[in-house]
Amino acid sequence: MTATPLEQMTAGDFPTVLWNDSADPRELGQSIAWGAVGATCNPVIAVQCIKNDLPRWTARMSEIAQERPEASESEIGWQVVEEISKEAAAQLKPAFDKHGGRNGRLSMQTDPRNHRNAKALADQAKYFSTLAPNIIVKIPATATGLTAIEDAVSRGVSINVTVSFTVPQAVAAAEAIERGMAKREAAGHDVSNMGHVVTIMVGRLDDWLKDCAKTEGSDIDPEYLEWAGVAAFKRAYSIWQERGYRSRLLSAAFRNTKQWSEFVGGDVVISPPFAWQEKIQAAGAAPENRMDVPVDPAIVEALSAAFPDFRRAYDPDGMSPEEFDTFGATRKTLRQFLGADEELDQMVRDVLVPAP
């Protein structure tokens, strides 16, 4: 039987690896069968996992409420998130053991309501890292998040940088990881089994520029807007190759199959949602080594000419850390994650105080 595209990619001919952008156990099981060696959970994903198995998780919320009579809605909801994450981590433990910590990890996201508090983010990251040996913790690439990343890494936490869309964010996050690693090494700790990744949410950069095009009335070729995230990711990868960062880049937030096919061949993580994995499999296109193939310079030039925000996203010095917080994609994504927290609270509320 002919191997599918994802099976071909993960068979060993490329350094590229597949992670599943979901912690749903059924989706993750199939993705592992296709070669996935990692997965992620965040507030949006956790809410969807609960909806996918609603009778089980609402019953569990009720049990937790009885076990912890003084727990808030948020505390009950986040205990469910922890339990979903630990189950997914267990599914990935064989890959974690096989890869010595570089893969086989389940990403847990820090509470977005702590996004203004570096100590709270780092403390929660340290706590999450104790839930399973193969937990990797997501902290946003904001000015506050960078401080938290360095702190958490110095305490031995493997980090997956999130809320990251641009080359300057990725570079700043990689530098924060390196500083944290240096502190940990100076304290006499072994860092060889840490497995940091720096996410670029490539599709969300595309989304933001599409918003800009509508607002500004740009007449740029719509197809060019499908290449913005790809161009930023490839630019970042070239910097990784030059500087030798000990983290890996991770491609997330898929909007087209180029956000898979253009990165094959790189020593990177590709993390499509399960539905996108199904689309890639159905398309049947064999993976090719395209990581080092540059995006058409005419596309990059057109995007740069049309959008100041693309220039800021593509230039490694295009934004300061303080500017990360006000970048449009950052605000949109943080609001979505905060909204998912509110939805999780509402789901718990419906269990604790059912509508009359």
Image: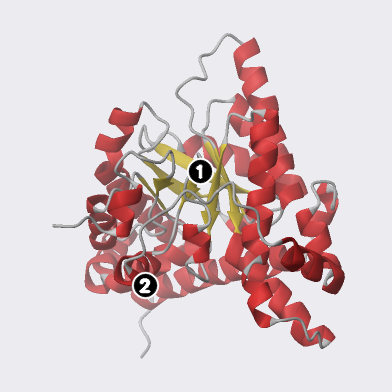
Residue 282 lies in what quarter of the image?
bottom left
Q: Is residue 105 left or right of residue 94?
A: right
Estimate the x, y position of residue 295 in percent, counting from the top left.
Answer: 66, 59
Identify the amino acid type marked 2. Answer: Leu
The mark lying in front, picked from 2 and 1, is 1
Q: Nearer the viewer, residue 137 or 242?
A: 242
Q: Nearer the viewer, residue 185 or 131?
A: 185
Q: Earlier in the sequence, mark 2 or mark 1?
A: 1
* Label at residue 242: none
Q: Which residue is denoted by mark 1 in the rendering? A: 268
User: Is residue 147 visible to the viewer in this orientation of the structure?
Assistant: yes
Identify the amino acid type marked 1. Answer: Val
User: How far apart are the alpha carbons under marks 2 and 1?
Assistant: 43 Å
Estimate the x, y position of residue 61 in percent, counting from the top left.
Answer: 32, 64
The residue lying at 42 percent from left, 32 percent from top is: 102
The residue lying at 33 percent from left, 46 percent from top is: 10
Q: Is residue 92 left or right of residue 251?
A: left
Q: Which residue is denoted by mark 2 in the rendering? A: 352
Element type at mark 2: helix
Question: In this rendering, is residue 55 above or below 267?
Answer: below
Estimate the x, y position of residue 240 in percent, counting from the top left.
Answer: 65, 36
Crowd class of label 2 (few under 14; some 14 to 19; many from 20; radius 10 Å): some
